[in-house]
Amino acid sequence: MKDLILVESPTKAKTLTRFLNGKYEIQASFGHVRDLPKGDMGVDIEHNFEPKYVIPTDKRKIVEGLKSKAKGATRIILATDPDREGEAIAHHLYTILKDNAKKAKFDRIAFHEITQKAINEALEHPRTIDENLVSAQTARRVLDRIVGYKLSPVLWKKIRRGLSAGRVQSIALRLIVEREKEIEKFSGKTFYRVFVLLSKQKEKSEIDFELVSIDKEKIEKSEKINLYDGDYTYKYTTLDKNLSNNIEQELKSATYTVTNLIQKDTKRSANPPFTTSTLQQEAFRRLSFSSKKTMSVAQRLYEEGFITYHRTDSFNLSNDFITSARGHIEKTFGKEYLSHERKVFKTKSKMAQEAHEAIRPTSTESQEQTITATLGRDFARLYLLVYKRAIATQMADAIYASTKIEVTAQKTKTYIFEANGKVLKFPGFLKMWYYEENDQILPEITIGEILDFLNSRITEHTTNPPPRYNEASIVASLEKHGIGRPSTYAPIISTLYTRQYIERQEGRITSTSIGVAVSDFLVKNFSAIDDIPFTSSMEDSLDMVAEGKEKWEKVLKDFYGPFEKTVTEAEGIDRVKIEDEMTDKICPKDGGQIVIKRGKFGKFYACTNFPNCDYTAPYVEETNYTCPKDGGQVIVKKTRKGRNFFGCSNYPKCDFAVWNKQQLEKAIAESTKSSASNQSNG
C-alpha cells in the first residue's frame, strides 16, 4: 500500500495530489477529529485538568474511513498546518489511528507553502509531533473551556439566559465598551482655522496657506487623554469665531512676504510583508473584507498553493523568495527600482515564531489572472494585496521633493502662514504598491518674494472624540497588547457579533446594551481576568508551554484557584437588569409604549406591557433622509449576509439603495440639483 498522507481539508488534499503525482494516498480529516464534548465541560479538574476528548458525532464517519485507510498502511504522514492547532490535530489523528495501524510508522511533516520544493523538503525531513506545541494548544482549549463553562452560568443567573463569556472574547468586548464610554465622556470644543489663497505675482499658480502663529505664538494646541487602550491626542486652535473674523478682515489688505523656505528630499520605504494581523487590517481598509472573510479567502489561497501559510506573526521572508523577488524586480522595472541591499524586516512581536514566514506569494510571477478564472474576483483581490506587498519589500525607496513655505503678513499683529507640498521624484516601491499621496504641488518660490492675495476663508471644526474601533483597529489593538494569536482574531470578533454584544454602524463597531451589561458585570466582579495585563500575561504563559519552559498543568492550576473563588463569590451578587431602548411609538393593541428588544435574530419592537400584551413588529432603523427617487423615507436594511445598506421604505415599489451615507448624500444632492435645474428651465 502507498504511504498515507493526512491533511485537514479536501482542498489541501487535492493540491498535494497534484504535486505528488499519485505517489501517496492522501486523505483529509475535515478539521479537528477530537474535541471537548458539547453540553459538558469535559475537563477533569480534580485530576490535573485532564481533557475528556470525544469524537464529535459529525466526524465519526470520517474517522471510521481514516481508520480503514490506516489499517494497512506501513507509513502514515501527518501533514497538518504548521501551527499549534495543526500540531494538535496531528496529535489527535495519531491518538485515534495508532491502535488500528500498529505496524505503521508515524511521521510529522510541516510546510509553510504548498509548492513542489516545499513539499519535497518536508518529506525528506520528517520529524516527530512537537508535544510542547500540543500542550500549549491543550492548555488554551482547556483554559477557555473552564472560563466559558464557569462564567456563562453566572451570566445566565445574573443577567440573561443564553449569554456567554470567554477569556479573550471578554477583553475584546471590554475594549469596545470602554471606548464607547470614552466617546460619551468626551467634551468637544469648537475651533476655527484661517486660510489664505495666494499666488505668485503675474502668475495663475494658486497656493493654499494656513495661519499657524500670531506674534510668534503657535495657535495650534494639543491635549492628551488617557484611554483604556492607551493615550489619545487631539489638536485644536486657539481661534474662536470672533477672533477669526477680525483676523480675516485684516488679512484682506495685508502684504504677504515669503520669509522662510525649506526644501529637501525625503524618502519613504516599503512596509514589511504581511502578518495575519496586518493582512486583516489592510484587507478591511482596502477591500472592506471582514476579518472572518479575509481568513477564509486566505485559507483557500494557501490550500490552492498560491500563498504561504496565512496564520503567522513573523516578518521573515525566505532567502529563496528574496532572491527570486529581486530578480523579478530588476527584470520587470529595471535595476534602479531594486533596493541597494536585501531587505530583512525584524519582527517586533515578542511572541513571533521567526522560523515561520510572513504571508507571501509562492511565486514571484503574478497568478492574478489564474486565480480570477478559477476562484473568483475576491480571491484575486486579496492575493494581489499579498503579492504587491511582498514584492515591494525588495524595491527601492520612493523619493519626494518636500517643500515648506512660510509667509508673513504684518498688520496690527504678525501673522505667520505655512504651505506644505511634495512632489514624487522617483516612485521606487510605489511602482508596485499603492500611491495615495494628495499634497499640493508648490511652484518655485524665493525668500523675500511678495505674493498676491486672492481670497481667504474660515473653517469651523470640532475636536473629535476617540474613534470607534473598526475591524482593522480592534485587531491592531489585540495584537498590540499581546491578546490572542493570529488564528484567534477573526473568531473573537465573529463571536461578539453572533452574541449580539457588538454591532456595525457605518463601518465602525459599537457595543449593544447587552454587550455593555456583560462587560460591566465582568469588570466589576471578575476584574482579575477581564483586564489587559492578565490576558496578555496568560498568553506569555502559553508561549512558555509551547517552548517547553512551563508545564501546562501548572499554568491551569495557578489560574484556577483564584478564579474558582471569584466565581463562588459572584453567586451572592444582585441580578443585573438590561434596560430596553425606549421609543416614541405607541402599541396599536393596548396603547402601551413600544421598546426595542433583542432576540435570537436581532432587534424587534415589543410592547412594555408584555406578557399581558404580545405585540411585536420587525425593527426598522429609520434615518432623517428622504429617498431621492420617490420621496419615501430612507431606512437602514441588511443583506442576507448581514451587511447594512440604505434603502427606500417603499420597496419593492421603489428600488433605491446605496451602501453608505456618503453615497446616499451624493444621490440626494444630485437629485436636488437636477430638480432645481428642471424648475429653472421650466
Image (spheres, grey):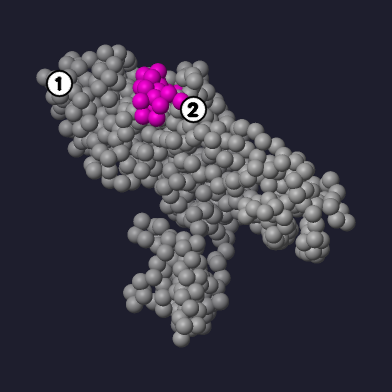
Q: Kindly identify the amino acid type of the residue bearing the numbered disc 1.
A: Lys
Q: CA distance from mark 2 to mark 1?
A: 44 Å
Can you tell which quarter of the image residue 305 is in? top left
Q: What numbered label is drawn on residue 311?
A: none
* In this rendering, position of residue 170 left or right of residue 374: right
Return the x and y of residue 278 as percentages of the image width and height: 48, 37
Return the x and y of residue 318 as percentages of the image width and height: 40, 20
Q: Report the magenta residues as a range.
A: 315-336
* Vertical position of residue 331 compared to residue 506: above or below: above
List the single residue furthest toward the top: 125
Q: Give the SS element for disc 2.
A: loop
Judged by its main secondary structure, the magenta piece is helix
Return the x and y of residue 682 as percentages of the image width and height: 46, 86
What residue sits 49% from the left and 54% below the top? 507
Q: Is residue 87 visible?
A: no
What residue sits 32% from the left and 22% below the top? 110
Label 2 with label 1: CB-CB less than 8 Å: no
What residue sits 57% from the left and 40% below the top? 423
Number of marks present in the image shown: 2
Residue occupied by mark 1? 23
* Vertical position of residue 607 compared to residue 82: above or below: below
Considering depth in this image, is 180 or 277 the residue closer to the camera? Answer: 277
Q: Residues within 10 Å of mark 1 (few under 14, many from 20)?
A: few
Circle nearer the viewer, 2 or 1: 2
Residue occupied by mark 2? 396
* In this rendering, position of residue 337 left or right of residue 91: right
Q: Is residue 291 visible?
A: yes
Asked if the stretch drawn in magenta spans residue 176, the answer is no
Return the x and y of residue 299 as percentages of the image width and height: 33, 37
* Vertical position of residue 460 compared to residue 622: above or below: above
Q: Kindly identify the amino acid type of the residue bearing the numbered disc 2.
A: Ala
List the single residue furthest toward the bottom: 682
